[in-house]
Image: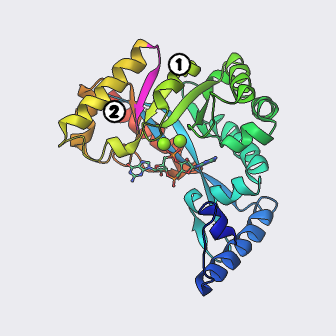
Amino acid sequence: MYRAKSDGRGSLRFFEPKIDADMRARRNLEADLRLALERSQFELAYQPQVDAAGSFVCGAEALLRWRHPQRGIVSPLDFIELAEDTRLIVPIGRWVLEQACRDAMAWPSTIRVAVNLSAVQFRHGSLLRDVLGALQLSGLPARRLELEITESVNLADAQQALSTLREVRSLGVQVALDDFGTGYSSVSYLRDFPFDRIKIDRSFVRDVDTSSTTQAIIRAVVDLSHSLGMKTTVEGIETSQQLQIVQQLGCSEVQGYLVGRPCAAAEIIDIIRKLSLTAADEP
Ligand code: C2E
Ligand code: MG
Ligand code: MG
């Protein structure tokens, strides 16, 4: 019935054993997810965000991992949607904020931490309180926290989300628009809110070394963002050719496997140090 409903009015679906198996798997995952927080099964990996010249680390993005007792490490792509549907993302998101701010306190004071937010945290959570709580508990200065939101936080239709975002920003917290260029209304987003940073989605990077169209798009987004006073980060840089081209296109920062894969909290400090040392060694 749910399959038929989700396909739209008047549609018809026959029962297939796979549907039942999928539903059972989802229910099992949901039951496990409900216990994951109290059983301390979540971890944060950190991926460095580096200046465009690749010389120093400017920040690190916290990426959620679920260490499941039977399944091993579960990717956020496999459970964030379920966490959103069940609203478990609200307490999970609060934990991410607190943990990320705590971890960042061990880093040099110039380095910020980026935390991903879900639209559900805007709709049903106490986001402002959670952000304030995480900053107060950890002692992290607000300017070192950056929140990454996607277009799924519908700013145009949600005055409440917009005012929450304004309040958060007035604390000194930075706000980034993640996965830019993948949705339908991205450009109007730039008008709705004064983002500190635009993160250009990695789907634009894949063919940047071969496609002049992709290069023109990235250049236009970079120019537009910079003329609005917003910094730009290009995501998903995997090769030195891609890095070289996005450097020429003028972006402010880069992120991707080439400059650093997501790694454990204990390792990121070494990576920050190593990357800074390499830069200092350069003539
Ligand atoms: P995102 O915020 O766009 O994060 C970047 C994703 O791209 C990460 O995947 C990262 O591992 C991956 N990535 C980084 N560099 C490269 C690269 O060079 N090549 C390729 N192929 N991939 C790269 P991950 O960790 O699986 O996270 C996926 C998505 O899950 C994130 O996308 C974000 O939307 C969501 N997510 C992660 N952590 C959280 C969280 O704490 N809260 C919420 N609400 N969402 C989260
Ligand atoms: Mg992100
Ligand atoms: Mg992204």
Disc 2, ligand 1: is the CB inside 8 Å? no
Q: Which residues are magenta?
A: 228-234
Determine the image quadrant of residue 173. top right
Q: CA distance from mark 1 to mark 2?
A: 30 Å
Kindly state the secondary structure of the residue where label 2 is placed: loop
- Residue pictured at 45% horizontal, 43% vertical: 271
Q: Residue 120 or 72: which is nearer the viewer?
A: 120
Q: Is residue 21 visible?
A: yes
Q: Residue 193 or 199: which is nearer the viewer?
A: 193
Q: Position of residue 169 (x, y in %)?
A: 67, 20
The tag on residue 211 is: none
Q: Is residue 282 visible?
A: no
Q: Is residue 61 left or right of residue 3?
A: left
Q: Amino acid at mark 1?
A: Arg
* Residue bearing the label numbered 2: 54
- Residue pictured at 18% horizontal, 35% vertical: 212
